[in-house]
Amino acid sequence: MNQDRLRLDLADLADEVTPVDLRDRALRTSRRLGIQRAVVTSAAALLVLAAATGTALAIRPDGQAPAPAVPSVTSTPPPPQVTPTPTVTPSRTPSAGPSTTTGGGPAGATFGRLFYGPSPTGDDTSTAGHLWSFQPGSQPTRLAKLPRLAAILNAVVSPDGSRVAWVDPDENLWVADVDGGNPRKLTPGGHRQVEQDCWTPVWSPDARRLAISVLLPTAPALTWEKGVVELTTGKYTPISEIQGCHPVWSADGKVLAYADGEGRVAVNRPDGTAEKLIPGLGVPGARSSFDVASISPDGSRLALLLRKPDEPAGDVARELDANAVIDTRTGRQVQLPLGGRPLLQAAFRDDGTLVARVGAGDHNVLVLIGADGRKISESREPATLKGQQILQVVG
């Protein structure tokens, strides 16, 4: 895609202000078995509802607003602000089954290492949830033990696969090694309470920072503020106001994407200064999305869960299922070589390849797709991972 066209698109932002009623959405019927009651009654959810009642707005800036009063979010001297520039590019478990290679991608391309956590629809009623890692051709490995709700709702594995961050049911932010070692509780900017359901933690591409949302106990109402915390120094930096849920951060560091709470999806700079709604989502009679799962390295494509116009939105909690990949400039769906099998999840890697998880009866299959849209290979996923959801793909 021509980068100048995208800059013009971002400059041509609408100037209206549209209310976003996250409270209404959070009260709608949830399709996520096993966590609905816990999400709706959690302390964080109640605080989100209180804040959303008075302040939840999706702002479409016109490009003429004053510059934000906070610096660009980085741990080193900030570079010049850059508009997002997506471009269109065509325990005891059985071992994995054999892979099938079909060509169409770079020589030697592999799936890398996948990280899993418990699924919202799993049958396990325990209070703990484990992370797992898996590489096709080997057996799954059990990793850190987390609070089960945190593992489902907000746990995120770093892009380098070394650490996991999560928010526990008491709204404390934690970071640890993926095997559970070296756990550390953080209080970003002195704020103890961190959002666990809506604007959940997301890693920066360099795995040195986390974008989060902290609670500001200000009068007359409690308010959530989005910001970034540097893990080495603990420094916390607020970012420009963004209203939305479930952010993902592109590997090139230039694009933040998120659902706005009304069925629309936006792309933005990581400092929050250039929001652009993706066309065709959340408008009357069209598809909507409240859950964004993964973003391509240059921000040109998103894997997400699209809902039909009459399909319930669910609650405000994170859902990592994906049934489509779309172009962020046009909103059009990208065709994937899945052989007619249903897409369950999709995760972009930092080399532009896509790992698609598709259903195949009592097990799932992983399909590796090149940046050119052609199938590279596929591998059978162990049946024991069927009740887990993919959190991250590394390498």
Image (cartoon, helix red, strand yellow):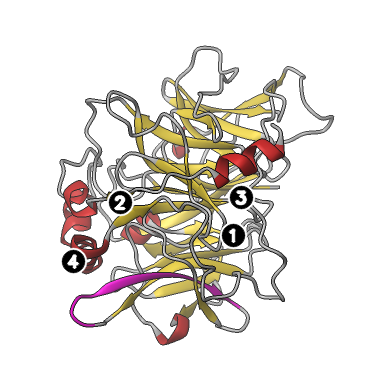
Q: Amino acid at mark 1?
A: Ser
What residue is at 48 percent from the left and 62 percent from the top?
65
Q: Assess whether mark 3 and mark 4 are in contact (beta carbons under 8 angstroms).
A: no
Element class at badge 2 = loop
**Location of mark 3 (residue):** 250
Query: In this view of the protein, which residue sits in the foreground, 188 or 378?
Result: 188
Q: Assess whether mark 4 and mark 1 are in contact (beta carbons under 8 angstroms).
A: no
Q: Assess whether mark 2 and mark 4 are in contact (beta carbons under 8 angstroms).
A: no
Which percent across, then down, holds residue 226? Answer: 42, 68
| Mark 2: few/some/many CA within 10 Å (<14, 14-19, 20+) | many
Which percent across, then down, holds residue 83? Answer: 63, 52
Q: Is residue 206 above or below residue 218?
A: above
Mark 4 and mark 2 lie on one chain; the one further toward the N terminus is 4
**Location of mark 4 (residue):** 50
Q: Amino acid at mark 3?
A: Ser
Mark 2 and mark 3 lie on one chain; the one further toward the N terminus is 3
Q: Is residue 296 at least partly visible in the picture? A: no
- Between circles 1 and 4, the one closer to the viewer is 4
Q: Amino acid at mark 2?
A: Ala
Q: Which mark is residue 61?
A: none
Element class at badge 1 = loop
**Location of mark 2 (residue):** 317
In the rendered image, residue 223 lying in the magenta stretch gets the answer: yes
Q: Assess whether mark 3 and mark 2 are in contact (beta carbons under 8 angstroms).
A: no
In the rendered image, residue 212 lying in the magenta stretch gets the answer: no
Number of labels in the image equals: 4
| Mark 3: few/some/many CA within 10 Å (<14, 14-19, 20+) | many
Mark 2 and mark 1 lie on one chain; the one further toward the N terminus is 1
Mark 1 and mark 4 lie on one chain; the one further toward the N terminus is 4
- Between circles 2 and 3, the one closer to the viewer is 3
* Extreme-front residue of the structure: 64
